[in-house]
Amino acid sequence: MIRVLICDDQQVVAAGLQAILSTATQIEVVGKAHDGAEAIKLVASTLPDVVLMDLKMPRVNGVEATREIRIQFPQVRVLILTTYDADEWVFEAIRAGASGYLLKDAPRDTLVAAIEGTAAGQTHVDPAVAGRLFDRVAQATPTAQSPLLATLTERERQVLVLLGRGMNNGLIAGELHMAEGTVRNNVSNILSKLNLTDRTQAALFALSHGLTDTNNY
């Protein structure tokens, strides 16, 4: 069972989301918050697997709440669910530690699948913003090589490159002829060594450092 906390300042929207998710037998809504401050408190008391987080809210907005939740409760994943697809919102949310970004007009099945994937450690970025997000990072001038890259093994660097291409564990396993469990271990090591919180940040790290070819190592 996936425990979900809904955070949206519009009570009607939050109630609608709860009604939609109640039709998914694998999901349990454990609470509803109507601003970021309330969300942080409810995370502490309910310990959800996934927080569905709106962005524009009073008192504490979704970006600030996401950052605080990820600091205090790193095991809790945050899936942004919002009407805002402006680039600055996307980047700020991901920098704050969000594991995915979904627009509110997404179909019910897409929402449920995104929650399931987020709970499983996958990254979901709405197609409406994904292209702009990765294009912007890929076209930027590569950042100076981080000394943390030297801590990665050759195989971990290859996995990092493929994370930068948006591949999931199964595709990476096929590309590098590895067991999927080994890929998971490599991803965990990469996040730990680079001080990153999730796969999305790892992908952006790879792109911003110009890591595009697994044969470069």
Image (cartoon, rainbow, N blue to C red):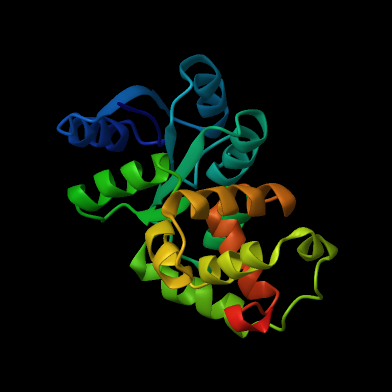
The spot of residue 139 in percent (x, y) is 61, 85
Left or right relative to 24: residue 186? right
Tell me which corner region of the image, top left, top right, bottom left or bottom right, holds residue 9. top left
Residue pictured at 40% horizontal, 39% vertical: 119
Residue pictured at 37% horizontal, 62% vertical: 126
Viewer-side residue, 87 vs 146: 146
Q: In this view, does 78 lie above or below 207?
A: above
Tell me which corner region of the image, top left, top right, bottom left or bottom right, holds residue 31. top left
The spot of residue 178 in percent (x, y) is 46, 61
Viewer-side residue, 34 vs 163: 163
Residue pictured at 43% horizontal, 75% vertical: 131
Viewer-side residue, 71 vs 164: 164
The spot of residue 109 in percent (x, y) is 19, 49
| The residue positioned farthest toward the right in the image shown | 147
Q: In this view, does 216 lie above or below 74?
A: below
The spot of residue 84 in percent (x, y) is 43, 58
Q: Is residue 143 above or below residue 5?
A: below
Quarter of the image containing the C terminus? bottom right
**Does the rendering let one see residue 93?**
no
How many marks the image carries: the answer is 0
**Does the rendering let one see residue 186?**
yes
| The residue positioned farthest toward the left in the image shown | 23
Left or right relative to 197: residue 109? left
Residue pictured at 71% horizontal, 84% vertical: 141
Left or right relative to 3: residue 209? right
